[in-house]
Structures are given as C-alpha cells and as structure tokens.
Image (spheres, rainbow, N blue to C red):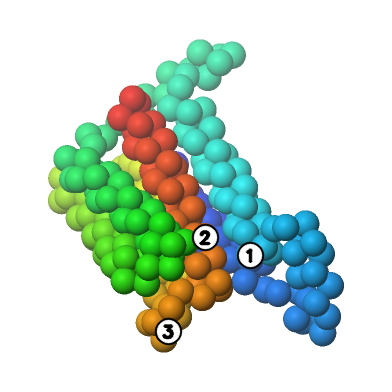
Amino acid sequence: MNLIVASAGVLIGLLVWWLAVSRLTTKSWEAQGTTDGRGTAEMLGVAPERVGLWVLLAVITSFFALFITAYAMRMTPHPVRGISLADWQPLPEPWILWVNTVLLLLGSTFMQVARVGASRGKATLARVGLLAGGAFAFAFLAGQWLAWRQLQAEGYYAAANPANAFFYVLTGLHGLHLLGGLCVWGWTLARMSRDDAIRDGVRLSVELCTVYWHYLLVVWLVLFGLLLIT
C-alpha cells in the first residue's frame, strides 16, 4: 500500500463519518413540518437521538471491521499460492501509545462521572466530569500526533511499506472519529454552561457523549491490541 491508497482510505473515512453524523443530526420530522417521527420514537420509549447514535456506531463498527480485515489479509501470505509478502515490515510501537491508552481510559472514566452527575441532577459534578473527559481526549490526540512525529523522525513513513500505511490510516481514522465526538462535546458543554440546572436535553447529550467515548475506547483497545500482536 502506498501513500495514495492510505490517503484514499482517510478520505473514505471522512465521507462515511460526515454522512453518518449528518444523518444523526438531521431531524426529519422538523424538515417535513411534522412531529410524527419523534412521536413514533417516543411511543416506543426510545429517544430518536439515542437511536441515531446506535445507528452511527453500527456504521463505524462495520467501517473499522473492514479495515481490520484488510489489515489481517494484507499482512499474511496468500492462502492459495503461498506468496510471501516480504514488503510487510512491522514497525515498532512508540512507547507513548501506552500513555495515550491511559489518557483515553481516564477520559472515558470522567465522562462516566459526568453521566452519573447529570442523571442525578448534580450540575457541578457533571461539568467537572465533562471538562476532564474532553481534556483527556485532547491530550490523547496530542499524544497520537507525537507518536506520528516520533515514527517519522525514525524514518517510518507511510509510503515506506504497507504496515506503516495501515498504522497511520487506522490511528488517523480513530483520531478523526474522536475529533468529531469533541465537536458534540463542545456543543454539550456550551448548553450546560447556560443553565444552572441539568435539563433533559443536556442530560441526554451527556449520556450519548459518554456512550460514544466508551465505544471509541473499546475501538482503540482493539486497534492497539492488533498492532501489538502483529
């Protein structure tokens, strides 16, 4: 895989993410001048926003599953011809990836604190948890950038071999999804700062952000584990 293929993978990931987020944030019942869509969802006892998030997570899961499958197929010899793919040269995992894993774990933990605070109506606890969760997410992204810089300083460029390209694509796509989550996080934090009390809409936003953070933590653990064992 060369740099062009890796860039194409990033662009495809951006397109899928944009389409999924657009679908999540679009309220079709408002566009049609009716509340039938929301009314149907409420009759089922499920908020439309919650359904939208799970649809988005399903899309992201399928997307990463395809990349992981491609990764496994590319690194192994051909199952029929027995061709040895000598151009696959695994790169060493930077030590900072372990630090980044801890940062993402802490971010997920504090987002859970925010969720608990919001569900109990404790605005201060919810704000502290939300702020800390976002701060650790930003620290994780900064750490991933440092990992990229470290590898490039050692000569591990994306175009050098397929293993390098897959590393940049997988970690880059994960970072883009986290960056998208931070946009919603900022919007939720802004809504929370306007009121002293925790309203239902804010409570739901905090809950959905927390679920998304937990999900991206699981995705990162899978990706990091895959990189370690290969």
Mark 2 or mark 1, earlier in chain: 1
- Residue 208: mark: 2
Q: Residues within 10 Å of mark 3 (few under 14, many from 20)?
A: few
Q: Are marks 2 and 1 in contact (CB under 8 Å)?
A: yes
Whether the residues at callouts 2 and 3 have beta carbons within 8 Å, the answer is no
Find out whether the residues at labels 1 and 3 contact each other: C-beta distance under 8 Å.
no
Give x and y (percent) for residue 81. 56, 14
* Visible residue check, residue 10: no
Tell me which residue sits at (77%, 57%) in the image.
Answer: 44
Residue 222 location (% of width, % of height): 41, 36
Q: Amino acid at mark 1?
A: Glu
Q: Earlier in the sequence, mark 1 or mark 3?
A: 1
Residue occupied by mark 1: 49
Helix, strand or loop at label 2? It is: helix
Q: Which mark is residue 195?
A: 3
User: Which circle marks residue 129 in the picture?
Assistant: none
Look at the picture and state if 53 lies above or below 84. below
